[in-house]
Amino acid sequence: MDLPLRPHVRRMQPYAPGKPIDELAREQGLLEIVKLASNENPLGPSPRAVDAIIGAARDLHYYPDASGFSVRSHLAERLGLSLDQVALGNGSDDLIANLAHAVVGDERDDEIVVGQPSFVRYAAAAQLANCRLIEVPMDGEMRYDLGAMAGAVTDRTRLVVLANPNNPTGTIARCEEFSRFLDTLPTGVLVVIDEAYYEYAAPDPEYPRTLEFVTDGRPVFVLRTLSKAYGLAGLRLGYGFGPAALVDAIDRVRQPFAVNALAQAGAIAALDDHEHLDRTLEANRRGMAAMSELLAELGLKAPQSHANFLLVDFGRPARPIYEALLAQGVIVRPGDALGAPNHLRISIGIESQIERLGRALRSVVAQGVAV
Ligand SMILES: Cc1ncc(COP(=O)(O)O)c(C=O)c1O
């Protein structure tokens, strides 16, 4: 059938989701699946958030508050910003798409500059906005090459989007180099700093304090989410902060009820549950240490990660290793889908999950799949 699809939509690839747990369990006849593929919180959501969501469920016959007033006020207060500097989205994915809608695509040759490999949704946002994506390779340590990124900016560049920590590498751009990078950019370029893994990286003194860039009135927009350390990936709530004029532009392009009522109720409770966040960060530190031991034992390397995952280098195409792990009920993320074909991105699990992963990886290595 000849449908009237827009040419750039025909060229787009749909999002390739990870293997669902239930499907894999059925396929492999396994009862217990370990999912370390989407950088979710292995401790689950905050119990306080769950209670708030159950409470809010009784009012589901009402539309949600389209302005997200309570969550935005809560966030504005925590950040020391005004309400009009804070935006919400149905996950930060939604904000990324809305930012692209608001900023690029007016001229066909508008450009978005990103790192490579970086978060796959930036490419999707560029495709959807029908503009050019300029991908700048990471340096030899899988860190942003900020000099090369600044060099890739032209008078057609509207947006530079960096995930910090970056997904899938886990590496960070550090405070000083990042400030220098911002100083070199011409006016008229908006820098989006995607801090989906902020809570994991924030304790590092070298991690950029991006809130200061916003309060200094720089043209930056910072994205954060409740999907990672706050354990609410299924609920869908992301937020961003930056110039009020940009929040106003996002308000024009967004769907009014994109952030549902349960997400609004759960978010405030989760943000206030400091104990759950502390437990999460501690579990991640322990998991990182156990993963480093496992990788050292197997002679495998990964760039130093400031997030809750590692990009493990197998030195050869890693898809067969992904398949072999899958056959043992361990789901990780194959790097070929992320622009790093020799790698697997493995989320940090709890002890029992890392033990399971260890057993599976050892047997894969013993079968000669990995080496
Ligand atoms: C760097 C980065 N940004 C954004 C997202 C999307 O997060 P959300 O669940 O808030 O849409 C992810 C999720 O994996 C991510 O890794």
Image (spheres, rainbow, N blue to C red):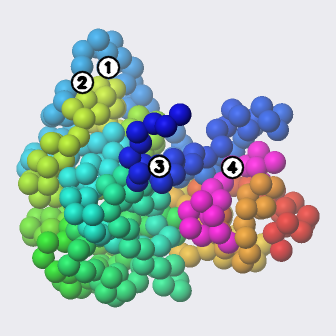
Given the current orientation, which residue lies at the most extreme front position? 2
Mark positioned earlier in the residue sequence (4 or 2): 2
- Residue displayed at 15% across by 68% down: 219
User: Secondary structure beneath disc 3?
Assistant: helix
- Please state which of the two labelled residues, at mark 2 or mark 3, is closer to the viewer: 3
The circle on residue 331 is 4
Near mark 1 (Cα within 10 A), the count class, few <14, some 14-19 or many ≥20, is: some
In the image, is the residue at mark 2 within 8 Å of ligand 1 by its beta carbon? no
User: Which of the two residues, 1 or 59, is positioned nearer the viewer here?
Assistant: 1
Residue found 21% across the figure and 37% down from its top: 71
The C terminus is located in which quarter?
bottom right
SS at mark 1 in the image = helix
| Residue 331 place in picture, x, y as percent | 69, 49
The answer to whether residue 204 is left or right of residue 264 is: right
Which type of secondary structure does the marked residue at label 4 adopt? strand
Q: Which residue is mark 3?
A: 10
| 43 left or right, relative to 86 | right
> Which amino acid type is shown beneath numbered disc 1?
Ala
Query: Residue under circle 1?
Result: 56
Q: Is residue 15 magenta?
A: no
Q: Nearer the viewer, mark 1 or mark 4?
A: 4
Report the span colored magenta.
325-342
Determine the CA span between mark 1 and mark 3. 40 Å
Q: Is residue 245 above or below residue 191?
A: above
**Which residue carries the number 2 mark?**
64
